[in-house]
Structure formats: C-alpha cells, structure tokens
Image: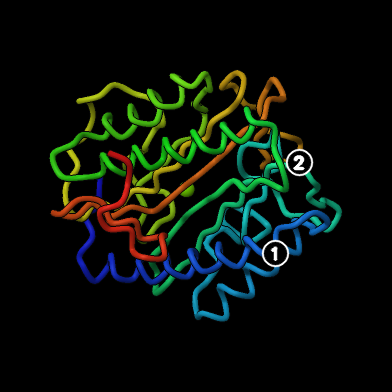
Amino acid sequence: MIILKSPREIGLMRAGGQILAEAMERLRDLVKPGVSTLEIDREVEEFIRSRGAKPAFKGYRGFPATICTSINEEVVHGIPSAHRRVKEGDIISLDLGCIVDGYYADCAITMAIGELPPRVQELLTVTEEGLERAIAECRPNRRLGDVSHAVQSHVECHGFSVVRAFVGHGIGQVLHEDPQVPNFGEPGRGPLLKPGMVLAVEPMVTMGSWEVRILEDRWTAVTEDGSLAAHFEHTVAITEDGPEVLTRLDGGRGSGAP
Ligand code: MG
C-alpha cells in the first residue's frame, strides 16, 4: 500500500533531507586520498546527531554503521572500516540516511577521488543524469514505470547497465515502504503518481553486466564481473507542482532534466 504524506509529514522529511544535503557538502572536503571509510562514517554520524536527528541505517537489520561506503566494484551497502582508505583514482559511493521526528530521508552520491579515466567519469555523469531524468517524471499523472524507464533508457543508451537486484522505494515512517522503484521498466505502466507520495529514487549503474553478488560480510554488494558501479539517490516528494527534491539544499523545486 502506498502511503500518502501530509504537508506536515513532508516538512519533517524535508528537515531530514536538508541535514543530509549539508552532510554531503561537508563530505566534499573530507573525502580525499588517505581518509578511511570509518572516518567518513564518524564525521557524518557526529553531524547528524549534532543537528538533533538520528542515523537511519545504524542498527537497521543489524547494519553496523551510519553510512554505507562502497568503493569501485562495490555497488551498495559497503561497511565503513578503519582499514579501508580511499586512494587516487577510486570512486566511492556514500549512502546517507537520517530520521527526524520519526520520518526518514535517504540520499546517495558517488564521488571521484582525483582524476578518472573519461569512461569512468562518464559512468558517474550518466548515472546522475539518469537520476535527474527520473526526478523529472515524479509528478502527478505520470506512472511509476515512467520513472523507471527514464533511468533505464538513459543509462542503456550510453552502454551502461542498471542493477536489477536493488531498487528505490517509497519512504516515510519506514525506510523502505511501497512502492518499489525499479531502475528498469516500461513507460506508462505501474501505479499512478499522486501528490503526497514520497519516493527514494536511486539508480545503481555498472560499466559491465548488471549482475551482483553479496560478499561474506553479508552486506556489501559487488558487481559479479568486477566492473565499476555508481549510485546516486534523492528523496523526492510528488507535489501538485511537480517534484520537490527533499535531499537537495535549495529544496530542488522545478529542477530535474527536461
Ligand atoms: Mg534508498
């Protein structure tokens, strides 16, 4: 069942979203060669708590940290570690969530550490563009399949693949609510989008095959073929006027690709 949110509820999710957006800004300075993924985690946890919010992922089904840190062929759900340091040429996906007064917000970004080969930079660019195109579909009278198709068509026309095993999701008083938001699908299919729906839209894109497997830590998802992967995510409210990106600093009204 898809739960519609009131303006008050969306306001709480916006408050959480702004905290995450600010945390992301701080990470742009912190995430440099030599920093450990645990140091990044500590920084984000301290910041989220300093703003009176709670980390959303810590303890979620036993996840041990505040953020997910997934490097290179790791797609999602990497566990921060004092022994894992980022280095020049890496790409690192950072997934952040927080709770304000019982309501969740969720976002992710993939950052380049230094210079990347052009095709790897293109992976990041195309994944983020896929997210923007999907956000542009988050408006009344579109269908969920339009959101999914926006990602898939953009990604595949650039020769990349979308992961099937993980999908975006509705979000509210629970981190993962209905509906599932796949990054693949047919336009014009699925539930009709309505004002008050809030979706975490999150393309996960690889340079090779879309197949993934889970490491022995039972969390980290890596590409089966070892190819690099990128992940971008925003929490998006559907309003009468179109998408409002709750996890973007300016509120994100009217943004998104054409
Ligand atoms: Mg999510």
Identify whether 207 is placed above or below 25.
above
Q: Quadrant location of the C terminus? A: top left
Is 18 on the left-hand or right-hand side of 3?
right
Reading the image, the residue beneath label 2 is 89
Reading the image, the residue beneath label 1 is 30
Marks 1 and 2 in Cβ contact (< 8 Å): no
Q: Quadrant location of the N terminus? A: top left
Identify whether 99 is placed above or below 221.
below
Question: Going 51% across and 79% down the picture, which residue do you hit?
Answer: 51
Callout 2 crowding tier (Cα within 10 Å): few <14, some 14–19, many ≥20: some
Determine the image quadrant of residue 45. Answer: bottom right
Identify whether 123 is placed above or below 135.
above
* Foreground residue among 203 and 57: 203
Q: Judging from the image, what secondary structure is the residue with disc 1 in?
A: helix
Question: Going 25% across and 51% down the picture, which residue do you hit?
Answer: 243
Give the Cα distance between marks 1 and 2: 16 Å
Is 36 on the left-hand or right-hand side of 168?
right
Question: Going 70% across and 64% down the picture, which residue do you hit?
Answer: 30
Residue 198 x, y percent position in the rendering: 30, 52
Identify whether 25 is placed above or below 73.
below
Number of numbered discs visible in the structure rendering: 2
Image color mode: rainbow
| Amino acid at dot 2 | Gly
| Amino acid at dot 1 | Leu
Q: Judging from the image, what secondary structure is the residue with disc 2 in?
A: loop
Residue 22 x, y percent position in the rendering: 51, 69
